[in-house]
Image (tube, rainbow, N blue to C red):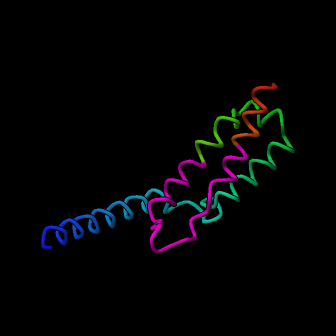
Amino acid sequence: DEYADILDDDFTLRKREVHGEVAAVFNDVLPEYCAIGTILERFAEWKKKFPEQYEQAYCDLSVPELVGVIAKQQALSWDPLRDDSFVTLSAVQHVIRDEGAHMASG
């Protein structure tokens, strides 16, 4: 159907534009800081080595926000019909649960 083809072309064009805009936002970020696992590891190290500074910097609130930005960026390029490599957010949920428990007890 011609209308469906037009919609598909419009979607493809807009998707490319969005990917270009996202790439521009992240173009000066080192690849290691675009990996959720690496980010979570760094924050966990910081929390373990410098718990007072970690708390003073409100990292409990920052981690979910920071990881959320990366997860959204990764979700933009995920196609569930063609790609099964999208990382589940179980690690993020684990951190949020741990931070929530920490906040409730602290």
Q: Position of residue 39 (x, y in %)?
A: 68, 54
Decide whether residue 77 is among the magenta residues: yes
Say which of 67 and 93 sits in front: 93
Say which of 18 and 50 sits in front: 18
Up the image or down, 87 lies above or below 97; here it is: below
Decide whether residue 75 is among the magenta residues: yes
Residue at image location 72% in from the left, 33% down from the top:
100
Q: Quadrant of the N terminus?
A: bottom left
Q: Quadrant of the C terminus?
A: top right
3 sits left or right of 72 in the view: left
88 sits left or right of 103 in the view: left
Q: Position of residue 98 (x, y in %)?
A: 76, 40
Residue at image location 77% in from the left, 37% down from the top:
54
Q: Position of residue 32 (x, y in %)?
A: 65, 64
Residue at image location 61% in from the left, 63% down from the top:
87
Say which of 97 and 81 sits in front: 81
65 sits left or right of 44 in the view: left
Q: Position of residue 31 (x, y in %)?
A: 60, 66
Q: Quadrant of residue 20?
A: bottom left
Residue lying farthest to the front in this orientation? 1
How many numbered discs? 0
Residue lying farthest to the left in this orientation? 2
Say which of 2 and 37 sits in front: 2
Up the image or down, 66 lies above or below 56; here it is: below
Residues in magenta? 67-95
